[in-house]
Image (spheres, coloured by chain):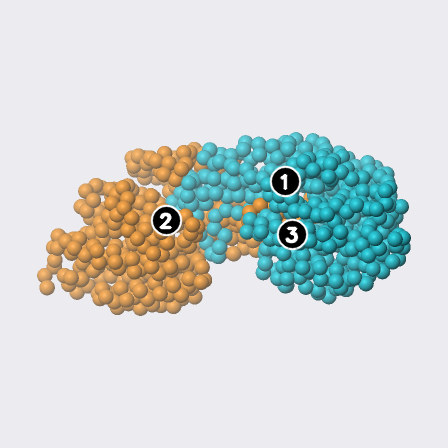
Chain colours: A orange, B cyan
Amino acid sequence: MAMATMDEILSAIDAGQTAAVERLFGFLRIPSVSAVPAHFPDCDRAADWLVAELGSLGFDAAKHPTDGRPMVLGHLKCARRDAPHVLFYGHYDVQPADPLELWRSPPFEPTLESGPRGERIVARGAVDDKGQLMTFLEACRAFQQFGGPPCSITALFEGEEETGSPSLPAFLAKNAKALKADVALVCDTGMWGPTVPAITIALRGIVGEEVVLTGPNRDLHSGVFGGLAVNPINVLAGILGGLHDANGAVALPGFYDGVEELPKELLELWDGLDFDAAAFLGGVGLTTPAGERGRTPLEQLWSRPSCDINGISGGYAGEGQKTVIASTASAKVTFRLVGKQNPERVSQSFRAFVASRLPPDVKARFIGGGGSPALSLSIKNEALRRAKRALEAEWGKPAALVGCGGSIPIVGAFKRELNMDCLLVGFGLDDDNMHSPNEKYERTSFHKGARSWARILAALAA
Amino acid sequence: MAMATMDEILSAIDAGQTAAVERLFGFLRIPSVSAVPAHFPDCDRAADWLVAELGSLGFDAAKHPTDGRPMVLGHLKCARRDAPHVLFYGHYDVQPADPLELWRSPPFEPTLESGPRGERIVARGAVDDKGQLMTFLEACRAFQQFGGPPCSITALFEGEEETGSPSLPAFLAKNAKALKADVALVCDTGMWGPTVPAITIALRGIVGEEVVLTGPNRDLHSGVFGGLAVNPINVLAGILGGLHDANGAVALPGFYDGVEELPKELLELWDGLDFDAAAFLGGVGLTTPAGERGRTPLEQLWSRPSCDINGISGGYAGEGQKTVIASTASAKVTFRLVGKQNPERVSQSFRAFVASRLPPDVKARFIGGGGSPALSLSIKNEALRRAKRALEAEWGKPAALVGCGGSIPIVGAFKRELNMDCLLVGFGLDDDNMHSPNEKYERTSFHKGARSWARILAALAA
């Protein structure tokens, strides 16, 4: 069979949109929340769903058990002998949906809403990452009608991306041979604007820590004991309140070891992006950059490390007063890393910071501590140059080369375990409510995302 | 009918013990949690229960509506023309029972457990305050068999003690004439030891504050926004972490205005009590006094002010990680006051402290702020001297004149609104788990408590 033209492939994608949305809805209905043990069976169902989906696309696919949620691995060999081999990665797990009361429709009952840019798909996982990974599989589906994609493809889907990918490094090490490809493709990032595509060339790393402080062996009356008995919430606030200095910098000893100044070339490229910080913050009700003093907003987001308390709890949180000194208090804290910051050392520094500030009778227990370093891709990379041209052909505008404040642990693991570069192309938008109530994915992102991948696969094979 | 002898009264109390425990159990089964709106109807039921109970004791009693939970007010006139008139106060509301999973038996299904000092009554409210207030009514019941108590009695029971008694001042002001008596009696405090009775002559005041910080208009992805968007939990920890200085003192400007050094006589009396701080702290798993440096433990508890965060919450508190910057964070804080500290000024100082530390884009909303000043009773008071002798007769040991770290808003209100002194006699023990899971009241406290009140009423009438 002769190679189809790009127009034929793109027309096939256009013609199959309704069925594509139906398939995505089926995937979104599975509440595969990896952080919550009650949803572990749902994670298994999502993995099974992907195995079936890959099978329908001609992949030889299977579910692989790990110590955590299963991996889905599939292979599709291209008939052309000189075809490049790409590894595509996505994740089928999603963030917890709470607070549920803020959703306009149930998070696991996907719906089409109309918005200022046309219809949008609303559900937990719509953009992160089920909708995004399906753009790639829909491109594969279009090629299938014409003899298959022009590249050999290994597809890898994990179910622990939202919980720090704990099982991934061991799985990669054990399956290095089956996973090694010329380049890895990942669809878990965003556009530069609603009509401007982007390739992400810098990703922050992450360290996630949870600390539980315990003082008295039970909750105490704050009148009877207050002023004499140690209060773990007072202690926790005192310690966490010291994590930042007066200039907004993180106060952990050694935290900035490995943080480097940006190359001038990249800093100029980013300045040229004319990032509208006021609009970015305004979209979430804010007006003022709040991080490290003396940095541009894009530096604060893409090339400077940060520290956020993601959750804190202790004592009585119900209505009214309860005059209690709680026995325990806890907090979840993440650090975003850049440059050569070492996740292990940041984790140790945090734990030492807490431990050194504990008064008598208060004990700290640490949970988590998983992490991944920051990553970057050279702007001279050949796959990057081809993908950039393919995106420009689809969107009519040059693709921006951007950083990303978030972390995708797989990218570090691909580099570390398989010495493989990653091409990060995604179609999310800033207002997609990722990790928030009413998460959505524009239908244009879903549709033109599939078209973009078709063009990129062809460009890589050219 | 001739006056009964004290022996006859006490024998009647002894003989009625089983029935008395049954009555108390009926009262304890009503989950009258005043902090939780879902339990407001239960608060009404508890008030009705008391009206019926007072009626059965010959009181002219009724339930009185307020802006919050109803008051119960009853009058019983003594036939003797020169009989003193006492006002007895108690509260029918109880603390929330959570965390429920730590109770050995359901909190509102009272049970008798055996303990090292004999049987104990286990239920929310067993000691605070249902069991305690019933000691007084059981004394009245014994007198009833012999023509009635030797004093005229006004009984006042409120249902908002655990939420700061917001409706009380207005009720007292409006009903001043009906409530005015020679002295007020309150049973909501503790013994000095399991066999040593006590009269509480110093009570700390209280200010309760709740602060809710709001930053972004929704929860954000901490990777995408971290380092640029303000994090309300980071801000809250920073502010609350500054509430204490390095010496354990409260850092609010002006907080110590009105805090006085103790009279030498009282300090010596307290030093003579040989308070075993190690045992007091050891009972709750602690070893080391944690409050203001340079103060004895009894000073820290009874005559120094304190500040405790009673609850804190924000962001994701479930299992695992959620990399979120929360839109809001909140905390409940109480201050215990002494001497002439002004609750209103402490409240204002806290709010100003928070407001002055807010970065741009973070707004603070304050809830609560109700409070009452600290109170003390002269050790030369005549009612105090008579009650002291009565207690010594019952327990065989002199009653200790003690302070109390907790707050009983009514005491301040009686002084302020009715210019009436308060005699605080109670039978709680340090290990009664007040405000905690498995709250209990010793049967000896309940039994000898009733006998103590019988003796005190007789002593006041003598």
Circle 3 marks a residue in which chain?
Answer: B
Quarter of the figure with residue B71: top right
Residues at discs 1 and 3 in contact (Cβ within 8 Å) = no
Q: Are marks 1 and 3 on the same chain?
A: yes
Residue A299, given in percent of the width and then of the height, sits at: 38, 39
Q: How many marks?
A: 3
- Amino acid at pointer 1: Ser
Point out the frontmost of discs 1 and 3.
3
**Crowd class of label 2 (few under 14; some 14 to 19; many from 20; radius 10 Å):** few
Which is nearer the N-term, disc 1 or disc 3? Answer: 3
Name the residue at 79% across, 62% down: B16
Residue B102, given in percent of the width and then of the height, sits at: 61, 60
Q: Is residue B287 visible?
A: no
Residue B126, given in percent of the width and then of the height, sits at: 69, 56
Q: Most extreme residue toward the front, as rendered?
A: B1
Give the camera-side residue of A387 and A213: A213
Name the residue at 17% across, 65% down: A79
Name the residue at 79% across, 52% down: B140
**Horizontal side, residue B90 vs residue A81: left or right:** right
- Amino acid at pointer 2: Arg
Q: CA distance from mark 3 to mark 2?
A: 43 Å
Mark 3 highlights which residue?
Answer: B48
Asked which secondary structure carries label 1, the reply is loop
Q: Is residue A283 above or below residue A175?
A: above
Mark 1 highlights which residue?
Answer: B167
- Amino acid at pointer 3: Asp
Point out the frontmost of discs 1 and 2.
1
Mark 2 highlights which residue?
Answer: A104
Name the residue at 32% across, 57% down: A28
